[in-house]
Image (cartoon, rainbow, N blue to C red):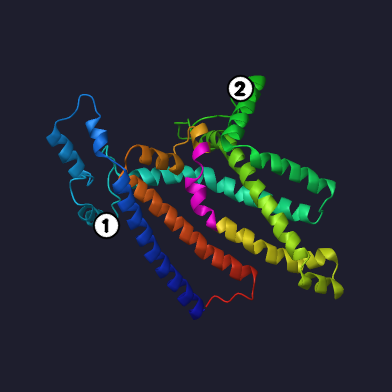
Amino acid sequence: MSSFLLYVLKRVAGYAVMIVVATSLTYFLASAFLNPRSNYESKTPRPPQESIERSLDEANLNDKTPVVERYLRWAEGVVTRGDLGITPTGDSVGRIISVRMVVSAQLLIASTVLSVLIGVALGVYTAQRQYAWQDRVTGAFASVLMVIPTVVFAILVVFVAIEINQLVGARIFFVTDMSSYDGGNPLLWLVDLVQHIFLPTLVLTVLGAVGYHLGQRTYLLDEMHADYVRTARAKGLTRRQAVRRHALRASLIPTAVSVAFSIASVFTGAVMTEKVFGIHGMGEYFINAVNGNDINGVVAVAAFGGVCTLVGALLADLFAAALDPRIKMS
């Protein structure tokens, strides 16, 4: 146990250094390519020059201040106060990130869990029926879904939902936003939330499950034809027993690693789905931060993505060790 904890602590320390380096590089790159000054100078009527300089200084975004000095001031705020800075409009980046994170979590956790469960189950099912009609039909559907852009699929789902609403004469599905209930009844709030997140969750689940389905099918087929599985069958195990006891466990390792590393993209990669359904999550904020010359916002999203990626890397190691006893966590 002590060697395991030491291993985890070493990895966490290494990841912390990587996050600091990646975040610092992002800060300097964002400072070089984004121009918050243009946000103020393009206003009509144009504010006085003194007002522009004062606003940029208050936001720590004044390009007339050396970038190293701005970086050190920003880093001091992050380390001593947990302050991620403010946007060119004066809003707190930390407050915006926390709100957006909750919105994205509500949408993406359910879709990620469902896509993994459905995709892996389909992959295992079809791998054991290679070239049977079940394998060919699900493979054909998966191939079609893989080439459909997310935006097109989301719009198609919205169109079908609107037709269903019109057919039954009631609003069953909401196609925009995350909530419209203002009352205090928790049951009605839950029903309203489900009505809003059902369609975007469906889009993300279906498109995510396709990748896990095809990947798990490939991994399991590779393991089913491995020498150790043939040896297990030669010793008397049935095909199903050999797959369940040996091949399935080994084939789940790359899938588990893939799921762990997808944590960051889960939060920041659902931009198109958020745009179509009018959901104000992390993905939309990242695009808005870049377009709005929001240096502190861009850096905060990059740091958040880095933390998610490295947490995923640690989880991937733990998953692999749990599934394969030959891997030693030391």
Q: Which mark is residue 75?
A: 1
Q: Please name the amino acid that badge 1 sits on.
A: Ala
The outermost residue toward the left is: 50
Please report the bounds of the magenta region as a residue range. Answer: 261-272
Residue at disc 1, secondary structure: helix
Q: Is residue 194 visible?
A: no
Q: Badge 2 local density, few (<14 within 10 Å), some, or many (20+)?
A: few
Q: Position of residue 240 (x, y in %)?
A: 82, 63
Quarter of the image for residue 194 reads top right
Q: Position of residue 116 (x, y in %)?
A: 63, 52
Q: Please name the amino acid that badge 2 sits on.
A: Ala
118 and 60: which is toward the camera: 60
The outermost residue toward the front is: 32
Residue marked by disc 2: 170
Q: Is residue 4 above or below residue 75?
A: below
Q: Indicate left or right for 99 with 35 as reference.
A: right
Residue at disc 2, secondary structure: loop
Between marks 1 and 2 in the image, the one whose residue lies nearer the viewer:
1
Quarter of the image for residue 222 reads bottom right
* Residue at image coords 62%, 28%: 161
Q: CA distance from mark 1 to mark 2?
A: 52 Å
Q: Which mark is residue 223?
A: none
